[in-house]
Image (cartoon, helix red, strand yellow):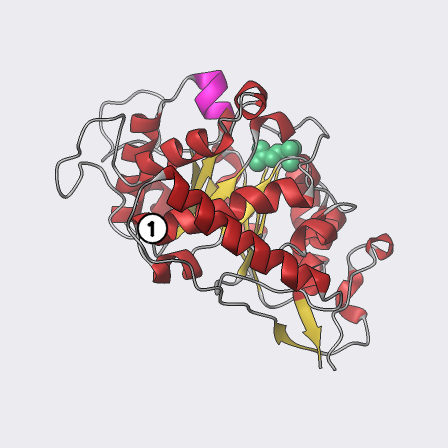
Amino acid sequence: MAAVVSTSLNGGAAISSHLTQFSGLRKSFLKLESSNSNSTQSFFQNIDSHLRLASANKGCRSVVTMAGSGKFFVGGNWKCNGTKDSISKLVSDLNSATLESDVDVVVAPPFVYIDQVNNSLSARIEIAAQNSWTGKGGAFTGEISVEQLKDIGCKWVILGHSERRHVIGEDDQFIGKKAAYALSEGLGVIACIGELLEEREAGKTFDVCFKQMNAYAGKFGHTVSPSPPVDAVPSWDKIVIAYEPVWAIGTGKVATPEQAQEVHVALRDWLSKNVSAEVASKTRIIYGGSVNGGNCAELAKQEDIDGFLVGGASLKGPEFATIINSVTSKKVAA
Ligand code: PGA
């Protein structure tokens, strides 16, 4: 019987040198109830049945499953950090790291260093911006357009990050508009969502996350949306959902694997009910918030965690490589 290899994280980045040959990611295609009913009872029954299936799988100790069908995805969000020198060192560390092949890897440098990174980083790693304007460029002082990002070599943009929501004050509608525009222009979107600590403590985690998801789908508040909704994302093909509980970001207080899995499974269920079962299966739902080289393997073992969005630990090349290579926690040995 195939055994699942749990990665030891003490050995730095060179995880690929393990002797084990992997035959692929173990997938589990859990059939989500396709009912369109919005009733709370039906929602929780559905979640409950999925969770029961998930925990039945966990009982089988050597099996690590992946509920989604998308490739593992790891993004590094460098935020407002770095200098020309420190970024050149980080790029050279990333260029010399051994990375598992079946992971999509993206880094998001500050705007002013994107060109430097694009000219020096291995093409193995794609580049994201940390923000983009809601529409075509023009008289918008201080903003950067999607067209300019594409021109300079970006393939992705991070939108809806908690720091933009809660420090800068961006609201759901504004973020939804940005996401719709970026996608319509062919940029991939790392669409962030997540609850504040007081919202979690008040039992509102799912409400908050679903409201933020609704905004990406072009539905706001309780009003009935026009059909098709204004500023709905045109397609879910190039969206990666990043669940980042605000209380876990930059705090060193990571969500437990169970806490993260609980929300990820609910998000996949939301996608199934509000978009389609196919999108629910294909869309990567990644976790962010104090992910590091020491906790990534346990998180990666959760079947609905399809990767990570990493802040602080993405500024250290070898540690970021360890996080990328935590995909081996999901693999089945040949
Ligand atoms: P952190 O940030 O890893 O430093 O907590 C995550 C993020 O903000 O994307």
Relative placement, left or right, of 273 versus 311 is left
Q: Main secondary structure of the magenta part?
A: helix
Q: Which residue is mark 1?
A: 273
Is any part of residue 216 visible from this angle?
yes
State which image quarter holds ligand 1. Answer: top right
Q: Is residue 22 above or below residue 259?
A: below
Is any part of residue 82 visible from this angle?
no
Tell which of 319 and 90 is nearer to you.
319
Tell which of 206 and 154 is nearer to you.
206
Question: Residue 252 magenta-drawn?
Answer: no
Q: Position of residue 88 (x, y in %)?
A: 66, 43
Identify the image quadrant of the N terminus. Answer: bottom right
State the extent of the magenta-drawn residues as a range.
163-168
Disc 1 is placed on an element classified as helix
Question: Residue 164 magenta-drawn?
Answer: yes
Relative placement, left or right, of 191 versus 75 is left
Q: Position of residue 136 (x, y in %)?
A: 22, 35
Q: Is residue 102 above or below residue 121?
A: below
Q: Position of residue 276 (x, y in %)?
A: 31, 57
Q: Position of residue 282 (x, y in %)?
A: 42, 61
Amino acid, disc 1: Lys
Residue drawn at (70%, 64%), measured in percent from left and top? Answer: 328
CA neighbours of label 1 inside 10 A, class few (<14), some (14 to 19), many (20+): some
Residue drawn at (26%, 29%), measured in percent from left and top? Answer: 220
Identify the image quadrant of the C terminus. Answer: bottom right
* Quarter assignment of residue 20: bottom right
